[in-house]
């Protein structure tokens, strides 16, 4: 009888200790929003959230379709500050990983550069966009209105 009560007490405290383990872990946060480029919804592209400053953790990215993006809870970011990079999809006349087609393109176009990213660097590789993701919200809605100049 004593052993049974002792085991129940151990089980009770074991369950309590596991329950408390994740209380300080706020987990990943979902993000969604719209992206305009010169007032027009961006048809296709990518948005990336890169940890910035003291924020440690994974980066996250979403696909832009018809001016909207959504990053699920499972793929989201932990609360903190992030640098945001946004790029518009560039249409290429070949598949991005087709080296033979790329070489053919360069030969036919006499080394002419590939189409340039229309979104200015201040929104992607030299991004000035910063956001703070807060814990406990059902979703963080972040809209961006990018200007060409």
Image: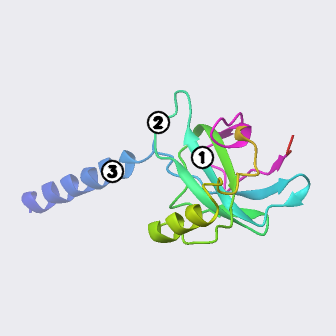
Q: Are marks 3 and 2 in contact (CB under 8 Å)?
A: no
Q: Residues within 10 Å of mark 2 (few under 14, many from 20)?
A: some
Q: Position of residue 142 (x, y in %)?
A: 75, 50
Q: Please tell me which of labels 1 and 2 falls first in the chain.
A: 1
Is 126 inside the magenta-drawn segment?
yes
Is 95 inside the magenta-drawn segment?
no
Q: Residues within 10 Å of mark 1 (few under 14, many from 20)?
A: many
- At x 45%, y 45%, the residue is 23
The N terminus sits in image quarter: bottom left
Q: Which mark is residue 94?
A: none
User: Residue tagged by mark 3?
Assistant: 16
Does residue 96 appear in the picture of this structure? no
In-front residue for pair 110/54: 110
SS class, disc 3: helix
Q: Name the front one of labels 1 and 2.
A: 1
Q: Position of residue 134 (x, y in %)?
A: 64, 42
Q: Please tell me which of labels 3 and 1 falls first in the chain.
A: 3
* Whether residue 120 is situated above or below residue 2 in the rendered picture: above
Q: Please tell me which of labels 3 and 2 falls first in the chain.
A: 3
User: Residue tagged by mark 1?
Assistant: 49
Q: Gap in Å between the C-alphas at discs 1 and 2?
A: 12 Å
Q: Gap in Å between the C-alphas at discs 3 and 2?
A: 29 Å
Asked whether, in this view, residue 86 is left or right of residue 59, the answer is right
Q: Which residues are magenta?
A: 122-146
User: Residue tagged by mark 2?
Assistant: 56
Examine the image and state in which quarter residue 30 appears.
Answer: bottom right
């Amino acid at each position: 009888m004593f052993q049974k009560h002792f085991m129940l007490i151990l089980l009770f405290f074991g369950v309590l200790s596991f329950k408390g383990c994740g209380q300080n872990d706020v987990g990943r946060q979902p993000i969604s929003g719209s992206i305009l480029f010169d007032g027009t919804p961006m048809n296709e592209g990518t948005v990336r959230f890169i940890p910035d400053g003291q924020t440690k953790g994974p980066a996250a990215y979403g696909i832009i379709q018809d001016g909207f993006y959504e990053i699920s809870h499972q793929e989201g970011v932990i609360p903190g500050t992030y640098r945001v990079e946004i790029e518009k999809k560039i249409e290429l006349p070949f598949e991005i990983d087709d080296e033979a087609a790329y070489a053919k393109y360069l030969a036919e176009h006499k080394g002419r550069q590939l189409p340039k990213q229309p979104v200015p660097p201040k929104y992607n590789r030299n991004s000035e966009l910063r956001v703070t993701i807060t814990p406990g919200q059902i979703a963080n809605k972040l809209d961006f209105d990018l200007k060409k100049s």
